[in-house]
Amino acid sequence: MERRDFVASVAGTIGAGSLRRPRPGPTGALGAPLLDAHAHVMSPLVAARISGRRTVEPLSATELIRRMDAAGIRSAAVHSTAYMMATDAFQRDVTAEQERRELETENDFASRECAPFAERLVPFLSVNPKRDHAIAEIDRGVDRLGMRGLKLHLWNSLVDTRDAEQLDRLRRVCEHAANRGLPVLIHAFVGAVKEYGPDDTERLVRQVIEPLPKLRVCLAHAAGAGGFGPATQRCLERLAALCPAGTPLGDRIWIDMAAVLFGSAAEHLKVRFSELVGQWGVGRTLWGSDSFETALADTQKVWPLGDEAWTTVCRNDGARWLTG
Ligand SMILES: [Zn+2]
């Protein structure tokens, strides 16, 4: 993965409002998805914080809706980037109280942005599951802000499930989400964990998802971190083997393809993507843009599974994930 992709992936967004590319043309013959399962809004505070040599622009819900309309997408799960304010992947020189205040401010922002578009935008709050206040913030987001899902970015929060205490904290946060009926989107791949791989995917499934039968999970980036390289391939292979479609476990796990088919993946990897997603099931594969403006057009150009499979992805409105 290129450095830019790495930073974007850890930050949790790839090009959300940041890359001023030409607008995508009208949706091609492949059609548009009903749901974008992996979208973001971005506050001016977050945009300023992650701007480096390259300026990152804020992204409002109004702009997100404009892009959805241009692409023909009906609804979106919109993930707060509040977890960036409680990150463990980057050094932040703030007190615990300030960090918590900023986390709350960002969840407030995502909720406020989505509110005027409640028919189309489903707001997901986010937390760092390692923080003591994670569960209280989930309750605040749901009860006071009306948020309807939970986003966890395990790389940004540096959650190493090989560590028993971190695994336990993650499990407790997921259990709380399950008890509250919240769908969860998990960026599971933690590139900062040495040789992160399929055993880590399996631990998440066996020790977090499987023991919580009410939990509904979408694994972002097809269980990877953007792009489709050998590491993502191995994680997705294990996931597909562990949770076949049509089983009680498999039927409450989805993947999204946010930023997976961008750029120029090698031909043999695209072939492997086709085989694996075919095996996993396109019916359990959700469209995700990561709020990258040209994501849909770019993906349609290289989509390797044919029209019928694309239509299946497009028709999935995510209702079983979002509302059970
Ligand atoms: Zn994202």
Image (tube, rainbow, N blue to C red):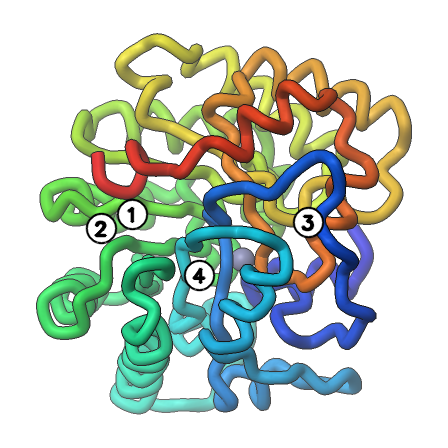
Q: Is residue 92 left or right of residue 102?
A: right
Q: Which residue is mark 2?
A: 173
Q: Position of residue 112 (x, y in %)?
A: 30, 79
Q: Are marks 1 and 2 in contact (CB under 8 Å)?
A: yes
Task: Name which of mark 3 and mark 1 comes first in the sequence.
Answer: 1
Marks 4 and 2, how far apart at CA: 13 Å
Amino acid at circle 1: Leu
Q: Secondary structure at mark 3?
A: helix
Taking the spot 42% from the left edge, 12% from the top edge, the residue there is 245
Q: Position of residue 219 (x, y in %)?
A: 46, 38
Numbered disc in front, either 4 or 3: 3
Task: Name which of mark 4 and mark 2 comes first in the sequence.
Answer: 4
Q: Which residue is mark 1?
A: 170
Task: Name which of mark 2 and mark 3 comes first in the sequence.
Answer: 2
The quadrant of the image that shows the C terminus is top left
Q: Are marks 4 and 3 in contact (CB under 8 Å)?
A: no
Amino acid at circle 4: Ser
Task: Name which of mark 4 and mark 3 comes first in the sequence.
Answer: 4
Marks 4 and 3, how far apart at CA: 28 Å
Marks 1 and 4, how far apart at CA: 11 Å
Amino acid at circle 2: Val
Q: Are marks 4 and 2 in contact (CB under 8 Å)?
A: no
Q: Secondary structure at mark 2?
A: helix
Q: Residues within 10 Å of mark 4 (few under 14, many from 20)?
A: many
Taking the spot 48% from the left edge, 77% from the top edge, the residue there is 62
Q: Which residue is mark 4?
A: 157
